Image: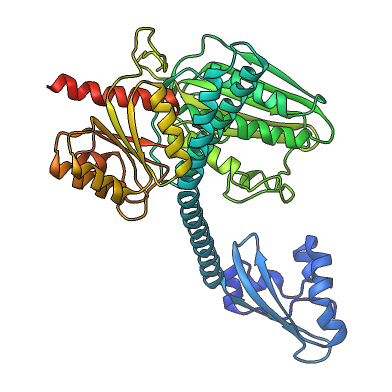
Amino acid sequence: MDYRFLSINPAFERLTGLKAADLIGHTVLEVMPDTEAYWIDLYGQVALTGKSNHFEQFAQALGRYFEVEAFQPKPGQFAVLFLDVTERKLAEKEKAKLQDKLQQAQKMEAIGVLAGGIAHDFNNILGAILGYTEMAREDAQPGSRSANNLDKVLTSTFRAKDLVRQILAFSRQAVVARIPIKIQPLVKESLKIIRASIPSTITIKQNIDAQCRIVLADPTQIQQIIMNLCTNAFHAMEKTGGILAVTLKTTLIDSATRLDGLQILPGEYVELTISDTGTGIEPEIITKIFDPYFTTKEIGKGTGLGLSITYGIIKSCEGSITVESTVGHGTTFHVYLPVLQKEAESKELTKSSNETLGGKERILFVDDEELLVGMWGDMLERLGYTVLTLSNSSEALTTFMDDPDQFDLVITDQTMPGLTGTELASRMLRIRPELPIILCTGFSYLVNEESAKAIGIKKFALKPLSESSLAKLIRSCLDEIGDSH
């Protein structure tokens, strides 16, 4: 009853490295003085009640898992049996990890299916909003309140368009095109949006180096990184207010640099730092914050995808992200993106002053969305084209077959009842192989730019399209045909 060792078998000696000669006759507390409370709670119950006790124990010093049975072989004594179940426990943990990965994969698959289903319809809706807003903007008096309001609608529409593209990219259903860009304008634009959407109790401080070097990235994804990190900072300070600090600079990482979690090659990087003075992150969860679906936010304030998307984007750019946080004092994220060594100019989408966007050619426009049919008919006529709009692909084929030479260009949607856009294009091209066709889609599992061009389609475009984008596409397509003749 005084917890003195009476007998120890060879298996215990092999397992622990302790020798029976050093233990027998000594009390447990003499040998292991830090285990008093532990022994009283678990083994003492057996000695005091006479009832056996079964439990599971992890021996930290040994790194082993045990099933333990403590019992009284006779009054006044008790015995302890240790069954080593380490291999089974490790197998169970590995199985749990695999099940978790499977669940995550299934969630990602579900997101992908949902994203693809939403994208087509939502992009059609955005197409109508974008087109009619652009026409209204052209008719509005320059500098008027209406013109300014319509500009804001256009800005929001383009943001919605980019959001759909981000969702598709996250679900790995859209190809991300990286271009040489400077990040400074994206940071400033994002902070303007954030300033308008957060309370005045939060002060934004920015230190943007105008000389920051060029990186190779997708502009929309960079903006998504900024918005995600700043939104998290805002939520951390929502109740108390505070300071949101954003810094952008070029930094050199050499082989001697030692930063926790910074797994990148030595070289020159653009460093984006976003910090807040909010609640901070608990040490026990800071390693989980980049996991998909992990969130500490209440329902309606977070999906758990923001930081995992951010992490994925940065890694795909061969960069890195680190986080430092103190509970009650705030959090700082450092984003490192490699500088593009070849000094290339960033691509700017500008319209040359002498560029002709309209024309006099005859266009057949086919789409099953009535709203888009009417909108594009009006818009193309405003550009000077003669347009026939149809919402039925079978009717469009019949009209074309009646006189294959009556149209200079065909624009068709992909997903339509009856004939799809690719089927319609294939049948038209059998009759008139040189016919220029532009295929548009909000989203499709069945066709992409490569497969469209393989059947003879000249141009492939993703909805929604702005007036200038489609006008350039049409002009480019027609001019290519004219040059080839």
Q: Residue 312: horizontal and vertical position, in percent? A: 49, 40
Label tally: 0
Residue depicted at x 50% and y 59%: 101
In the rendered view, does 443 fall on the left or right side of 138?
left
- Viewport quadrant of the C terminus: top left
Query: In this rendering, is residue 393 above or below 459?
Result: below
31 and 152: which one is in front? 152
In the rendered view, does 448 fall on the left or right side of 216?
left
In the current view of this chain or complex, which residue is farthest to the right?
48
In the rendered view, does 94 fall on the left or right side of 392?
right
Residue depicted at x 25% and y 47%: 397
Q: Residue 313: horizontal and vertical position, in percent? A: 49, 36
Query: In this rendering, is residue 21 above or below 284?
Result: below
219 and 159: which one is in front? 159
Query: In this rendering, is residue 421 above or below 326?
Result: below
Query: In this rendering, is residue 65 above or below 216?
Result: below
